[in-house]
Image: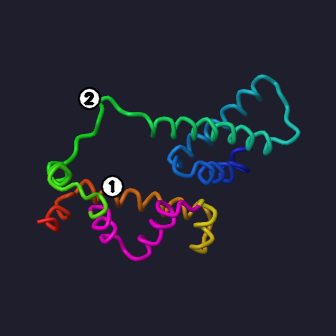
Amino acid sequence: MAYRQYGQAIEKYCRISLGEASDSAADCTQEAFYVYYKKLLDSESFDNPRAFLYKTAHNFVLKTKEKYFKEARRTKPLDEADELSVELYNLISDYTDYDRIKELLISELREEEQRLYEWKFTERKPLQEIAELLGTNPAAAANRIARLRKKIIGLIQKGGQLNDDYR
């Protein structure tokens, strides 16, 4: 019953709070309800189950963010590193003007994607502010940023189009 009442709200909270790590929002929600369920099995009662679920979700958000950013800063051993496409490897090894590579990547984006890129990655605006600028809610803004990130990764992996521009 609690899941039907609070499930969507808790997941939305997790998605917004996790920001860049929002892929873990479903895990966050599941973890909060799992802890709640275990406590119910131990015959605990709750005056305000909603508050307990939010607090539990918040604790999971903090742990997940810490783990996400710690992992993002970690240098991977060479045998765990992703292989670059041959084209991108050649591009990087032959031409190391990273500002030019960045310009070419950004030029492949639509105007609204370029603006979002600037806000998020150049100006480092917080998610709430980006959502206000877009005229939407933070969850929708987080989804747009995630789609933008995937598109940029796809462009980098293609690599071949950019390679032609350097010759």
Residue 40 to residue 138: above or below = above
Residue at 53% from the left image edge and 49% from the top image edge: 22
Residue at 33% from the left image edge and 55% from the top image edge: 153
Question: Is 80 positioned to the left or the right of 8 in the image?
Answer: left
Q: Amino acid at mark 2?
A: Asp
* Front residue (pair 16, 86): 86
Instruction: Provide the residue span drawn in magenta.
Output: 101-125
Residue at the disc numbered 1: 153
Residue at the disc numbered 2: 79
Residue at 64% from the left image edge and 39% from the top image edge: 62
Instruction: Answer whether residue 61 is magenta in the image.
Output: no
Quarter occupied by residue 51: top right
Q: Mark 2 vs mark 1: which is more N-terminal? A: 2
Question: Is 131 positioned to the left or the right of 99 in the image?
Answer: right
Residue extending farthest top: 42
Estimate how packed mark 2 is, as few (under 14), some (14 to 19) or many (20 or more) residues with alpha carbons within 10 Å: few
* Front residue (pair 165, 35): 165
Placement of the N terminus among the 4 image quadrants: top right
Quarter occupied by residue 75: top left
Q: Position of residue 40 (x, y in %)?
A: 77, 29
* Most common secondary structure along the magenta stretch: helix
Q: Amino acid at mark 1?
A: Ile
